[in-house]
């Protein structure tokens, strides 16, 4: 697969992830209180909210290339360069962690097989060993799939930054060793002011046409006011919904209304996806915490002879399954933030005041 094809495959893959549930705050994933943002922080690029040390250098490398990589298609719009870099980085981190978890699961299955094979034979031993072998084969397939997607992600990042794959693995070694995936340090909004649409290139270009238009009569001026007036109020999360806009006899105004309606529909869908993935990630985070406590309890029982090594292996495997599900969900959540920032022109963090009513 070529580097360009790999980059396209990565971004298309990120758009196919599934989601559930309703709205919640990313705060549920963090127990620590965060300080209030300063003025300088508020003006920082949106991707700095990931608090990922390697990202600034990757973004600078991508932005400083003599010929920036062309925008890659993502749904009905294209991701800007900074969002492409963030998406490739998140993909690399997510698939690498899931690859490592698959290898850990395979190791526990091999240990489980040795433990059972060394135990006194029982009638169901053959069936138990067969099941372990089947699970190990499934684990090998998952590891291979995660490795392939990880390689597609790093190839995409290489295309965007102009760095070699080898250099990227070297520079990102510490980040890839972490079990903590990138998390966007901001509360998930319940709604957004419609004014965020004005930061989108399509809406901005449409508004500029109106600004150049004639203003020869009160009726024309009234018509011209329709477009900007419909950029006030709130955008709610409603996937697939197209907002109702008034019509206009002026082509430029009608164009703005049409473009704004489509833009709002995209932002609304991205906001809904973010809310759903926030809920799912928060739920899985709690599941993993409970599973960790269960495993620690089994280990304590083993120390006093109330549990066996096999019990610990089973508890570890259950935790690894939930860890993988949480890793996939955390990656989807991070990507949902990238999509929302891309569809609002990077204004989803700054747009926290009251909209014009």
Image (tube, rainbow, N blue to C red):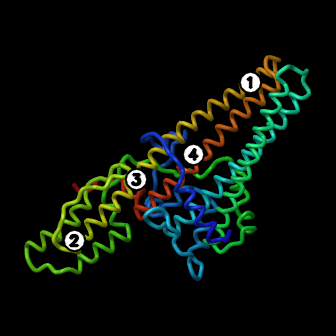
Q: CA distance from mark 2 to mark 1?
A: 67 Å
Helix, strand or loop at disc 3? helix
Q: If you read the primary sequence from the N terminus, does the residue marked by circle 2 or circle 3 appear first?
A: 2
In what element is the residue under mark 2? Answer: helix
Asked if the residue under mark 4 is in contact with the one under mark 2, i.e. CB atoms within 8 Å, the reply is no
> Which residue in the protein does label 3 denote?
269
Horizontal relation, residue 226 to residue 289: left or right? left
Residue topped by disc 4:
329
Front of the two marks 4 and 1: 4
Q: Residue at x 43, y 60 (%)?
A: 39
Q: Earlier in the sequence, mark 2 or mark 4?
A: 2
Spatial CA span between label 4 and label 1: 27 Å
Label 4 sits on a secondary structure element that is helix
The residue to which callout 2 is attached is: 253
Between the C-alphas of marks 2 and 4, the distance is 41 Å
Whole-percent x, y for residue 172 in the image: 70, 61
The residue to which callout 1 is attached is: 298
Are circles 3 and 4 on residues that touch, CB within 8 Å?
no
Q: Residue at x 67, y 38 (%)?
A: 321
Secondary structure under the numbered disc 1 in the rendered image: helix
**Vertical placement of residue 200 versus 275, above or below:** below
- Answer few, some or many: residues within 10 Å of disc 2's Cα (few below 14, many 20 plus, some between 14 and 19): many
Residue in the picture at 36% in, 67% down: 199
């Amino acid at each position: 697969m070529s580097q360009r094809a790999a980059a396209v495959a990565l971004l298309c893959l990120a758009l196919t992830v599934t989601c559930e549930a309703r709205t919640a705050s990313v705060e549920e994933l963090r127990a620590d209180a965060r300080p209030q943002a300063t003025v300088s922080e508020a003006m920082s690029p949106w991707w700095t909210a990931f608090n990922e040390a390697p990202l600034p250098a990757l973004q600078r490398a991508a932005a400083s290339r003599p010929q920036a990589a062309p925008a890659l298609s993502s749904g009905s719009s294209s991701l800007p360069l900074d969002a492409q870099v963030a998406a490739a980085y998140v993909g690399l981190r997510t698939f690498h962690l899931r690859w490592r978890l698959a290898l850990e699961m395979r190791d526990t299955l091999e240990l489980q097989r040795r433990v059972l094979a060394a135990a006194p034979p029982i009638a169901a031993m053959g069936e138990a060993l067969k099941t372990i072998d089947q699970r190990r084969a499934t684990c090998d397939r998952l590891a291979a799939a995660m490795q392939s997607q990880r390689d597609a992600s790093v190839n995409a990042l290489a295309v965007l930054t102009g760095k070699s794959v080898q250099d990227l693995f070297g520079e990102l070694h510490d980040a890839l060793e972490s079990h903590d995936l990138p998390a966007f340090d901001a509360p998930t909004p319940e709604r957004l002011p419609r004014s965020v649409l004005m930061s989108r290139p399509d809406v901005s270009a449409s508004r500029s046409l109106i600004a150049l238009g004639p203003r020869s009569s009160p009726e024309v001026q009234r018509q011209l006011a329709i477009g900007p007036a419909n950029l006030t109020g709130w955008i709610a999360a409603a996937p697939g919904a197209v907002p109702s806009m008034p019509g206009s006899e002026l082509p430029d105004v009608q164009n703005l209304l049409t473009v704004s309606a489509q833009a709002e529909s995209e932002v609304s869908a991205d906001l809904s996806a973010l809310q759903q993935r926030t809920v799912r990630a928060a739920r899985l985070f709690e599941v993993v915490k409970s599973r960790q406590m269960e495993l620690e309890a089994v280990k304590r029982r083993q120390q006093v002879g109330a549990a066996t090594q096999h019990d610990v292996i089973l508890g570890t495997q259950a935790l690894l399954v939930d860890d993988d599900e949480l890793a996939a969900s955390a990656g989807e959540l991070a990507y949902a933030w990238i999509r929302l920032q891309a569809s609002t022109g990077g204004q989803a963090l700054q747009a926290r005041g009251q909209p014009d009513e």
